[in-house]
């Protein structure tokens, strides 16, 4: 697959939400086979940028193109066959079973030849997101982390070549954090273009090809993890001193703590 | 406890679920057939079910079964009973389906045409026709005015009560109170304007009654309800996806705005089909879809047809009760459904508050 085959690009995007100028001249692109981690402090505009990339928010200025075509020119269904989105918060108005929720990801392919693979793809997606044992449970009765994984399975079932994931690891335990990013990484290796919003910089360093740092509505840095995640840049953007250390070949970002806890035995 | 119960009861294998779906629809269909035959026979002049069937068979040219033994039996069946039980069935199906659609588009299981004021909006339209004597469309005038009133109120509720893709229960109920207050004022004003006969007719609308059902009314009701029901079945699949929320629904390819507007028009159409000739019959659209969801889950592809059949059964039986409970009296059916539906609504609100931890 050429790097141009599936690509999503935002060019000089401006977004205002009420008074706030949330994004100012932001450009970000992701190509086939690439996993881009979008990081930055709270309120930097990460989720807004993801909404712009997914077509939910139309920017005041600037363009977004998917596979070379403007997002606005694609109908909802056409768009859904090309990109899948995992939102930060999952909700479900009625008590559907987990298997039914995952199968909803196949909706864009209804009445197309690809629908023949529906059952296989749903089963595979549930396996990859580790939710197969939950298949017959009711979605609203699941824990937050389980709901997030079910939604992730739904996104995988959609089989879109562009994946946009907004904090997919937020509610997950360590094992599932690694598993979800491992699956996202594998999807990229198979040719998907993936954008992941992350808070954990060490996770971003471990799984991303590129890390884009958003700060106050502008891109502060965009490049390979080792080039972007430096003590200086991260400390400045997050306004908190951090140290980036190399642990056995992987970068780990550690906040510098001014007051550390005493050893437990010293507490009376 | 209540939250985990459904998980256990629905833990069935897929083929069994599919068989269960067919079974539910077949069972409801059979129940509807039986209810129609029994209800058509019961009343001041009793005709046994066998004779009801016999009369039907003879009418279509089959020489099967006994004809009504009472000299007035045949006439009673064909001039009074059949139009009445069929009107009940069509109105019940339309109202229950409208409820199911409305709950889907509002993302709230408490939305219902009667509760949020759509029915009274449609009644206001119908009452205007009565008072001002508009006859621009013949027998269709009342239906068209009811549709316009219903559509206007549905749009109002929708615009006033939705926020971020969902409607909170408290907003929905309060919007309903406000709209019902406004439509009541409108109806009161129309009663003030109208003459005695118009007043009586308006009272009839607000109480809801199937007394005076006629074949000519059915000729209007049936096509309108049929269009609405077919549209509802076509909307079932995307409505499932709307449960994900507006944004996620769009992400899986639903044109959310178009789906919402289409659904609202269909809700108004179905509500108008019932209200135009039967008046306000509340809570059918609340009780029936809720019971179907308990039995068969929230998937609209089953919920919509099962609600239609269930609503028809419920209203046929409710009407049977309304006209036989007290001898020589025809109780207003809207009063009966509210009498039963009110407490049910109350119970649902309590439950929603408990399970959602608030007025979500």
Image (cartoon, rainbow, N blue to C red):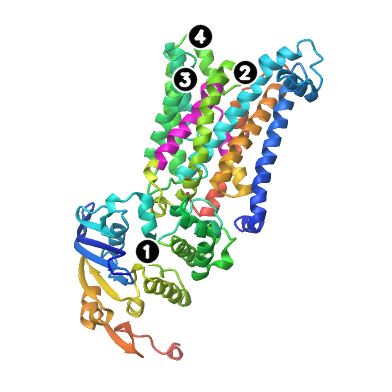
> What stretch of residues is rendered in magenta?
B259-286
Distance from the alpha carbon under mark 3 to that under mark 4: 17 Å
Residue occupying image coordinates x 32% and y 83%: A254
Residue A214: give its label.
none
Q: 10 Å neighbourhood of mark 1: few (<14), some, or many (≥20)?
A: many
Spot occupied by residue B67 in the image (x, y as percentages of width and height): 79, 17
Do circles 2 and 3 both sit on a common chain?
Answer: yes
Is A27 left, or right, of A204 in this rendering?
Answer: left
Q: Nearer the viewer, mark 1 or mark 4?
A: 1
Q: Are marks 3 and 4 in contact (CB under 8 Å)?
A: no
- Disc 3: host chain: B
- Disc 4: host chain: B
Spot occupied by residue A70 in the image (x, y as percentages of width and height): 25, 54
Q: Which residue is mark 2?
A: B211
Q: Is residue B106 magenta?
A: no
Q: Is residue A213 above or below residue A253?
A: above
Q: Which residue is mark 3?
A: B126
Q: 10 Å neighbourhood of mark 2: few (<14), some, or many (≥20)?
A: some
Distance from the alpha carbon under mark 2 to that under mark 3: 17 Å
Is B340 left, or right, of A157 in this rendering?
Answer: right
Question: What secondary structure is marked by label 1?
Answer: loop
Question: What secondary structure is marked by label 3?
Answer: helix
Is B306 left, or right, of A40 in this rendering?
Answer: right
Distance from the alpha carbon under mark 4 to that under mark 2: 19 Å
Q: Is residue A20 above or below residue B166?
A: below
Which quarter of the picture shows residue B337?
Answer: top right
Q: Which residue is mark 4?
A: B196
Q: Nearer the viewer, mark 2 or mark 1?
A: 1
- Disc 2: host chain: B
Spot occupied by residue A6 in the image (x, y as percentages of width and height): 31, 64
Residue A161: give its label.
1
Q: Is residue B281 magenta?
A: yes
């Amino acid at each position: 697959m050429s790097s141009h085959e599936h690509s999503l690009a935002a060019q000089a995007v401006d977004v205002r939400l009420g008074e706030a100028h949330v994004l100012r001249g932001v450009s970000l692109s992701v190509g086939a086979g690439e996993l881009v981690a979008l990081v930055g402090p709270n309120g930097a505009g990460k989720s807004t940028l993801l909404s712009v990339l997914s077509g939910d928010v139309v920017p005041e200025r600037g363009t977004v193109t998917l596979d070379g075509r403007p997002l606005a020119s694609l109908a909802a269904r056409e768009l859904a066959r090309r990109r899948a989105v995992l939102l930060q918060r999952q909700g479900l108005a009625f008590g559907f079973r987990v298997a039914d929720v995952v199968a909803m990801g196949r909706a864009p392919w209804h009445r197309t030849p690809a629908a023949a693979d529906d059952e296989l793809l749903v089963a595979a997606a549930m396996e990859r997101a580790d939710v197969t044992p939950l298949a017959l449970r009711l979605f609203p009765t699941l824990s937050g982390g389980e709901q997030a994984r079910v939604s992730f399975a739904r996104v995988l079932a959609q089989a879109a070549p562009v994946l946009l994931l907004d904090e997919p690891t937020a509610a997950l335990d360590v094992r599932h954090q690694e598993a979800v990013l491992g699956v996202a990484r594998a999807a990229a290796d198979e040719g998907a273009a993936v954008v992941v919003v992350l808070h954990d910089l060490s996770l971003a360093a471990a799984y991303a090809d590129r890390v884009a740092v958003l700060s106050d509505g502008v891109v502060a840095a965009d490049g390979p993890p080792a080039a972007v995640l430096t003590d200086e840049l991260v400390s400045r953007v997050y306004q908190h001193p951090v140290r980036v250390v190399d642990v056995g070949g992987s970068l780990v970002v550690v906040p510098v703590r001014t007051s550390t806890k005493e050893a437990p035995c010293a507490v009376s | 406890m209540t939250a985990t119960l459904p998980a256990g009861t629905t833990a069935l294998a897929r083929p069994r679920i599919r068989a269960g779906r067919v079974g539910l629809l077949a069972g409801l269909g059979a129940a509807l057939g039986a209810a129609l035959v029994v209800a058509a026979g019961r009343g001041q002049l009793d005709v046994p079910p066998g004779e009801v069937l016999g009369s039907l068979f003879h009418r279509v040219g089959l020489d099967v079964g006994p004809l009504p033994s009472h000299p007035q039996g045949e006439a009673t069946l064909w001039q009074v009973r059949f139009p009445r039980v069929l009107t009940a069935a069509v109105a019940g199906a339309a109202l229950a389906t409208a409820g199911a659609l409305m709950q889907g588009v509002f993302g709230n299981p408490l939305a219902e045409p009667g509760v949020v004021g759509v029915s009274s909006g449609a009644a206001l339209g119908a009452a205007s026709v009565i008072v001002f004597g508009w006859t621009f469309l013949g027998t269709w005038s009342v239906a068209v005015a009811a549709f316009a009133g219903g559509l206007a109120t549905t749009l109002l509720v929708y615009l006033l009560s939705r926020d971020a893709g969902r409607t909170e229960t408290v907003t929905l109920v309060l919007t309903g109170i406000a709209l019902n207050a406004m439509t009541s004022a409108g109806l009161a004003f129309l009663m003030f304007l109208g003459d005695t006969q118009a007043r009586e007719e308006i009272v009839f609308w607000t109480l809801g009654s199937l007394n005076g059902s006629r074949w000519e009314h059915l000729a209007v009701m049936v096509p309108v309800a049929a269009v609405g029901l077919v549209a509802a079945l076509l909307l079932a699949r995307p409505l499932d996806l709307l449960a994900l929320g507006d944004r996620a629904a769009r992400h899986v390819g639903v044109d959310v705005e178009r789906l919402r507007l289409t659904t609202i028009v269909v809700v108004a159409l179905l509500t108008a089909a019932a209200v135009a000739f039967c008046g306000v019959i509340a809570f059918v659209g609340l009780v029936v879809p809720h019971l179907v969801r308990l039995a068969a889950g929230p998937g609209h592809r089953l919920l919509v047809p099962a609600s239609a059949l269930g609503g028809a059964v419920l209203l046929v039986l409710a009407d049977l009760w309304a006209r036989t409970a007290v001898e020589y009296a025809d109780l207003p059916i809207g009063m009966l459904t509210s009498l039963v539906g009110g407490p049910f609504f109350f119970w649902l609100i309590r439950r929603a508050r408990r399970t959602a931890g608030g007025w979500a």
